[in-house]
Amino acid sequence: MASEAIVLTVPGPHGEREMRVSSPSRVLWPEVQITKGDLARYLVDVGGPFVAHNGDRPVSLQRYSTDVDGEQFFSKNPPRGVPEFVRSVTVVYPSGRSHPQLVIDEPAAAVWAAQMNTVVFHPWASRAEDTDHPDQLRIDLDPQPGTDFGDAVGVALELRTVLAEAGLTAFVKTSGNRGLHVFAPIEPAHEFLDVRHAVIGVARELERRLPEQVTTAWWKEERGRKIFVDYNQANRDRTMAGAYSPRALPHAPVSCPLGWEELEEAAPESFTVLTVPERLATVGDPWATMHDSAGTIDVALDWWERDVAAGLGELPFPPDFPKMPGEPPRVQPSRAKRVDGED
């Protein structure tokens, strides 16, 4: 017996492609009964904006063996069976190793990824032609226990002001969960470490202005009931769910770009695989003009240097990174105190 499959006609820059999707009735989001076929059709419907914001970048694929409650794994290297029209680019990881990663150049490539059981798409902050130099400054506002999306909104609005003072134009999207992602287009003139330092400079400035609402503390035990500015998302090979990417949460949310005028009234749970295509058709894409002009990180780097001169140095890196110059010990503060007491 032939296996269940559908064929979708997918428009793109090189004309239409006929893309086969097997097992389209397999349920990916059990709580809302959204299927693999629904996901593939969603990616066709949002194809243009999806590629505009996630294309021409190395991308990691978050794939699931069954549904979003099941086993997951990340594909960075191109999996077997990649269509001839889907390219890859070699990137350098923090370890110094080099490997190819996929690049999505048209909606059909995203549909093929869905056929390979991809749910979440994680694009790099740099372009495929120059993977070492980000063209986006990205800031992840992560609500800690006791805070919620509404708390992140107020912080994001102040962050927009801080970025404007640094000469940067901010764009905002839902994370697809409880937080917010704020992006600013930048000239691809600096390496990842410089951009990370610029983000720390901005984050510390934001923390000064909102000390009761914002924290840059890496260790969870030190964050309190605040919004954590996750500066480490600016590192090489650190990615966020892309704009219009689905998320692997029960109600099938989407990481959805918003206009700043929408933010205070936004309900993040309302942006889903089922609702976002209609939103795009009626509201349009709030990020459509993002890369019309790019700023520099010069002011943000000046803030970083000012803080270093004042005694605020490097912050911890993720645990899988090599030890970095000037980095403080990667030891949980309470554990370090216990060890010091024993000594």
Image (tube, rainbow, N blue to C red):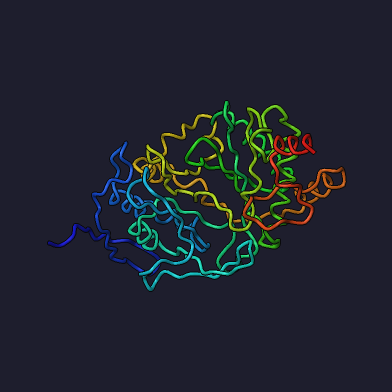
Q: Residue at x 76, y 34 (%)?
A: 208
Q: Quadrant of the C terminus?
A: top right
Q: Is residue 323 visible?
A: yes
Q: From this viewpoint, which residue is outermost toward the left?
A: 1
Indicate the quadrant containing the N terminus: top left, top right, bottom left or bottom right.
bottom left
Q: Is residue 152 above or below residue 89?
A: above
Q: In the visual, does 2 lie left or right of 327?
A: left
Image height of 247 relative to 40, above or below:
above
Which residue lies at the image location 59% right of the left edge and 29% below the top edge?
151
Does residue 116 appear left or right of residue 219 in this picture?
left
Nearer to me, 319 or 190? 319
Furthest residue in direction bottom, as rendered: 84
Where residue 92 sits in the image (x, y, percent)? Answer: 60, 66
Whole-percent x and y of residue 68? Answer: 37, 45
Q: Residue at x 74, y 43 (%)?
A: 165
Q: Is residue 164 visible?
A: no
Task: Report whether 311 appears left or right of 44.
Answer: right
